[in-house]
Amino acid sequence: MPVTHLATGMRLTGLFTELRRRNIFRVAGVYAVVGWILMQAAGVLENSLHLPDWFDSAITAALLIGFPVAMLLAWAFEMTPEGMKRTEVVAEGESVTDKTGRTLDYVIVGGLVLVAALVIWQGTRGPILRQAQDEGTEVVANTTPHSRIKSGTGSELVHGSERATNDAITNISAASIAVLPFADLSPDKDQGYFSDGMAEEILNVLANLSGLKVASRTSSFQFKGQEAIGIPIIAQQLHVRHILEGSVRKAGDTIRITAQLIDAETDKHMWSETFDRTLTTSNIFAVQDEITKAIVEQLSSRIAGPTKIAAPTVRNADTQNLDAYELYLQARALFRRRNNVNLPNIIETFEQVVAADPDFARGWAGLAAAYGVAPSWDVLDRDYFTLSNEAARRAITLNPDLSLPYAVLGNNKAGQVPGEFADAFVYYAEALKRDPKDVNALQWRGEAYVATGFFDEADAGLKRCIEIDPNYLQCRMWHAKTKLFQGKTDEGLALYEDALSRGGVGGELLYAITYAHAGDDRAARLVLASVFQRFSWLNGRTERLYRALTDPAFDFKQEAKAHEVEWKAIHGDYEAWSGATALIFKNYAAIKRETNNPFWWIRTDPDFLKSPDRKRVIRESGVYDYWRENGFPPQCKAVGADDFECE
């Protein structure tokens, strides 16, 4: 070997030995492991703290620039018992590079273990997300700012399911949005009703703009608390391109509202802003207007073609009383979860609203609705129909453009005994003229169509209600009833079971009768048990009713007497017979019209269908009077001057 080559090889060997002695390779390994972990942390922080999209890229660039600097420092300095010293001034016995090297080895091994754990976690999380999407997992609830999953390079991790989601979103109109419930960031976390109310107010304004598709309140609010599923998947399930999310923080007399608009296709922020204001109703409405205006501007800039989104109008606060407004948001939130237990509290809260501000039209409308539904939930301690009518008319006087008061008046007209259905349909038309998407009006009008036997009209209106708001469960429940009364039993039970699985309630005795008639005794028993537990009838005992539906040897006359005695022993003089229980016991003479249960259309008891009591109840309900003035449904016809028959 030539001398020059040998000398060069010896110099390279010496350099390599010196690099090892100074722990250059170990420092490089530690730097690589720590740098990778820092890039992962940067990706997480960018999303959780809503930092700019360039944040993780800046961290990566800084780490790359810092690498040669770290290598130079490791070469130039050495650790000694007295601390860091320049390498050339360190005597051979003072160096502790061997000890430092062992420490660095431990750091490298620990870092590699951590890296492996993170890689395994990311690899398993992706399939879980894919499975959740592929199985069409239905999630109940949302809100709080979303997060994106980052890969080891700081770029977005896009799995196969996420790519499919983005492809699906690409085909959705840009003029579409869902408003998720805002997160409650108040110190005591007790302002959920307020943060939800802010999101709902903005949603309502957007929903009334022509040219813009807005996911319904119940559909978008089902994702509350489920932000981890990811904005693209939520948007795909709601069939929208854009998502609005935000947060509300109340502290003393100040409020901070943060909103951010996200393009679900890219999972990127299009717009975000924070509003710090003094807590007044005027400021709250002003912020809502600013947010809706910004959304329309952002979306309008992306829409091609002749379709344009209408510009939102500036709204004035319909109450200057902050206490009244907050109570209204509380009462409205409770009303959506109404039942026979919490309805008295709902009524009391709405009464506090109008007491705080007697000129608050929406407060009176809400009170009218709460009064109006009370009888159908067996809350009967006052004349609620009269109270409801008075509250609804007060709301109309204050603001004739509201749809809800007209819908309430219609429901009251149809629900009283006897019902005045012609007037009811006039009020429903007035409500829908003011707001064609008023699902309350669509539901209650559907009930009136069912009561009067116009099932095709009921079916069409209830389908429209479900189309507007797929998770408005009362429309689903009444759609199922319509099918049962049309004789489409299998379809009706399937619709009922679907609504029940979503949380729907109501009409349980009707379905218990239908299940028993179809031979499904187990389902009949379970439905009976659920309704009696919910209303605490007969202390939850349903054995006698179950035998009435399933035992061929059941003594209806004797057992009906025992039922009445037992009922009065528990409930006093409270009416022992509802329409459905009287029907089950074949006590037809005791049957009275219920406010929201047109059981005269039930097809499972031939004896009742042929009995004079069926005709009596139809007459007492006001249905026959409506037919005489407005025409009969297809399954019924007039007989003589003052009689009728139905198939």
Image: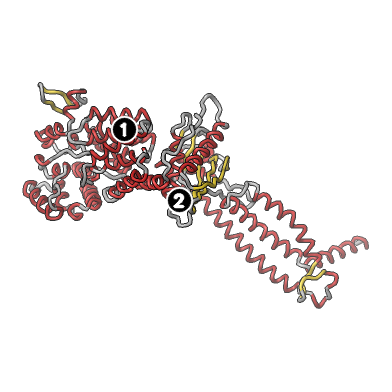
Kindly give the residue lying farthest to the bottom in the view shown: 93
Q: In what element is the residue under mark 2?
A: loop
Circle 2 residue: 225
Question: Residue drawn at (29%, 38%), measured in percent from left and top?
Answer: 391
- How many residues crowd around disc 2 within 10 Å: few (fewer than 14), some, or many (20 or more)? some
Q: Is residue 525 left or right of residue 198?
A: left
Give 522 or 609, whichever is nearer the viewer: 609
Question: Residue drawn at (70%, 71%), measured in percent from left and top?
Answer: 102
Q: Quadrant of residue 387?
A: top left
Kindly give the residue lying farthest to the left in the view shown: 558
Numbered tag placed on residue 478 in the rendering: none
Q: Is residue 518 above or below residue 225?
A: above
Q: In whole angstroms, how far apart are the C-alphas of marks 2 and 1?
A: 35 Å
**What colouring method underlies this structural image?**
secondary structure
Q: Is residue 618 left or right of residue 151?
A: left
Residue 502 position in % (x across, y down)? 35, 45
Q: Is residue 6 left or right of residue 293?
A: right
Q: Amino acid at mark 2?
A: Gly
Question: Residue drawn at (31%, 28%), measured in percent from left and top?
Answer: 429
Q: Amino acid at mark 1?
A: Tyr
Q: Is residue 36 visible?
A: yes
Residue 421 position in % (x across, y down)? 23, 30
Question: Residue drawn at (21%, 45%), measured in percent from left and top?
Answer: 382
Give 8 or 242, whichever is nearer the viewer: 242
Residue 376 position in % (x across, y down)? 24, 42
Numbered tag placed on residue 406 in the rendering: 1
- How many residues crowd around disc 1 within 10 Å: few (fewer than 14), some, or many (20 or more)? many
Q: In what element is the residue under mark 1?
A: helix
Q: Is residue 635 above or below residue 54?
A: above
Image quarter in which the C terminus is found? top left
Image quarter in which the N terminus is found? bottom right
Q: Is residue 462 visible?
A: no
